[in-house]
Image (cartoon, rainbow, N blue to C red):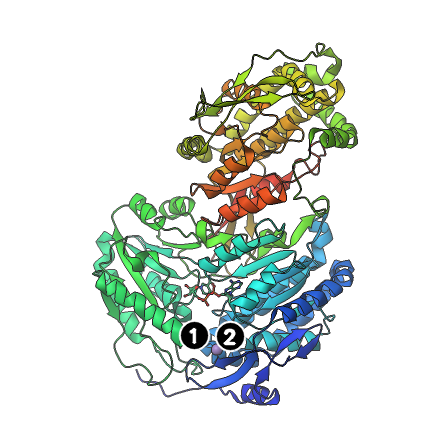
Amino acid sequence: MEYGPSPESNADVVQWLDRHGRRFGHFIEGRFVTPDGRPAIPVRNPATGEDLATVVCGSAEDVDQAVRAARKAFGAWSRLPGHERALHLYAIARHIQKRSRFLAVLETMDNGKPIRETRDLDIPLAARHFYHHAGWAAVLEDEFPGYGPLGVCGQVIPWNFPLLMLAWKIAPALAAGNTVVLKPADLTPLSALAFAEICQEAGLPAGVVNIVQGDGGTGAWLCGHSGVDKVAFTGSTRVGRLIREQIAGSGKRLSLELGGKSPFIVCEDADLDAAVEGVVDAIWFNQGEVCCAGSRLLVQEGIAGRFYQRLRQRLDTLRVGDPLDKSTDVGAIVSAAQLQRIQGLVQQGLDEGGVLWQKAGPLPAQGHFITPGFFTGTDASATVCQEEIFGPIAVSMTFRTPDEAVLLANNTRYGLAASIWSENINVALDMAARVKAGVVWVNATNLLDAGAGFGGYRESGFGREGAREGMYEYLAASWEAAPDVGAGAGVDAGADAAGAGVGATDAGAAGAGAEIEAGAGPVAALCAAPAGLAPMAGPAVDRTAKLYIHGRQVRPDGGHYYSVLGPQGQVVGQAGLGNRKDIRNAVEAAAKAGGWSAMAAPARAQVLYFLGENLAARSEDFARRLVGDAGASPDRAREEVRAAIRRTFYYAAQADKFDGAVHATHSRHVTLAMHEAYGVMGLVCPQAAPLLSLVSLILPAIAMGNRVVAVPSAALPLFAMDFYQVLDTSDVPPGVVNLVTGDGASLAGTLAGHAEVSALWYAGSAADCALVERAAAGNLKACWAVGSRDWLDLQQGQGRAYLRHAVQVKNIWIPYGA
Ligand code: NAD
Ligand code: MN
């Protein structure tokens, strides 16, 4: 069928560009500033090659000025009641809607994407994001009691969804009470400036939103600026890794939304017509320049021939061309460089034996266009099957069984999204559980909404955007706000701090005693009669702690031990000096203990209750050790032991209660926000409250189904020996908890660099944190610095924050209702 051209008018945008003299700068403290002497970045329309304007490339001073403005605005903005911030966000949302046609045309001209998509998707979703987060601002005090903003956020976004990515960054930051400095991509700087105008029109206080234009260097200045408290980035995995390394040890919070190579799985019982349309939306939408694009088609063998045939037919009906034309399906690639990159990868796919199916027909004579298509016959190890093409070209492979589909799906270093097509709910949900991806669409693809979390597993980054889980990326607990990257507090500090926590702990312990009276005599006895402990003498020097790996006490690989000194400098025992090999063995043991993650939550809870009982039975030993090794007073020692027992029961209770949510999104789906274990976690424990802190880190991690490799404090490692005896008697399966003692910093470095470890909690000096966070950039593991805190305190030492850091949220969209 032939269509006549039906271009959207760009008159408004041309007028707007002219009004600004086609030269743009930054938006700082509520004003547009165009400093002299900065390099100019050309802004091009990729569909025509036409120069639209120039923007200045921000310098370090420009960044500094913007960060100062954001800091200045922070106090008043963060003190506004949530409902007043909500009014500002509502106003922005309404202005975006009012200017939606203008914004859609502007975005299309700058980026090259079809007007149909900017009009129906980019702009409405951006407005929706501000509406949704206006709501979070309004209910903030209710929904996040005890939490507040982080400060100034430095945000860097890519060019594929310029305004939408801006909305994803700015809306939650502002809702939580932060102020921001945002750097758009140098290829698509314009819609951010239109947004800045909206901020002015809507009366947003000066300095709350600042936009600095520039390239990667400008972005690096922003991320590295000492006045920035939180960095949020969306873009390539390469740059995400650079940023992780750059800000290691700074104490800044970080969220990363990176690349993907997401599977699109078509089972033989799928609705093939719907699945074909799904592919259109998965990989040919937005020219394939989509981080969550369904770029790896996995098709069940029996239907592959038929499916490919239909796909080729559908491909031929796609209209490639003028993005401003309302009937265009596929527009221009964002830049000549990106086009070359895609063409290079396509050539590589051909060289590696792939068969390329492309739409027939010519491309526009000018502009950066490429014909959409897909490869068949590519090997799973081929470059095009592993690398993000970021263009409208999918690769395709076949599978025989659902098991094989899951294996193929997870055969990538990424884990952003997955799309699963099957009419059989059992098959679809079984796969949804097993794919390693932060977002899963069942019989759908590329559904995005502010009400659902979005973000990756593995090298697709960490952190979520949207929904409740996204809000936490911009909030800190009030007790967290104090800088906490210092050295793990010494025993003395811990003992001092204990005073404050005693009352609360006492009350709680009594409660716990009542709760478990029925089955757990020792705990009840301990809580009822704390004075029943035997006199505490320093122990003899005959204790040698081995390492604990896969449920067994093992000698350290190097065969070395070190002397552990007591409070008076006397030797109180020997501990194994673990090395890299020991860490690797421990990680291997943890990796093999996957059964723990698969176990039903109530069954895990049962094991943890039993652990609590056995800990209680050994409470005298632990208290004595705290006196002898750590120099605690008998009272303080009992307090700590009681708190550790109580904490164990708390996490046993939470094992089947810290569950996910069903999000309310704009379409007819139940969107399950599942809490999934990371898998293998590394825990580097502090020295303060050595028993309690060990328990405080291990328990939430394993309660949520993780298996852990813990490095007990080097100065006080002997508690670990007592603890593994408790583990031995508690039905904790081998490999779920592994303990490696030795030099904390170097073991932490090995853990941080290990590709099998997906998340890491660590205490240590700022220098140790820097080392760990740099090493963690390798596989982009999620890091959480648990610096000095009062472990006895019920807010600081336990709670939902620990559980939240022990899971990653997987959002699964399932069709629901007609
Ligand atoms: P990029 O990661 O280089 O750019 C993204 C943003 O980061 C831009 O604003 C850029 O100016 C900025 N930036 C670059 N270097 C920086 C640094 N060292 N510190 C701080 N900020 C920095 O992406 P790109 O070069 O535009 O595209 C390259 C590839 O990245 C694409 O082909 C695609 O595979 C991938 N990509 C992914 C996404 C996504 O949404 N996940 C988006 C864009 C590109
Ligand atoms: Mn452009």
The one nearer the camera, 722 or 271, is 722
The one nearer the camera, 280 or 534, is 534
Residue placed under numbered mark 2 in the picture: 188
User: Is ligand 2 within 8 Å of the beta carbon of the residue shown at mark 1?
Assistant: yes
Say left or right for 595 vs 482: left
Instruction: Say what amino acid the circle numbered 2 marks.
Output: Thr
Tell me the SS state at disc 2. loop
* Whether residue 505 is situated above or below residue 765 in the rendered picture: above
* Whether residue 446 is situated above or below residue 748 in the rendered picture: below
Residue placed under numbered mark 1 in the picture: 334
Most extreme residue toward the front is 569
Say left or right for 226 vs 80: left
The one nearer the camera, 197 or 95, is 197
Picture residue at 68% right of the left edge, 54% below the top: 150
Instruction: Say what amino acid the circle numbered 1 marks.
Output: Val
The one nearer the camera, 547 or 60, is 60
Q: CA distance from mark 1 to mark 2?
A: 9 Å
Crowdedness near tag 2: few (<14), some (14–19) or many (≥20) residues, C-alpha within 10 Å: many
Residue 556's x, y, as percent? 45, 24
User: Is ligand 2 within 8 Å of the beta carbon of the residue shown at mark 2?
Assistant: yes
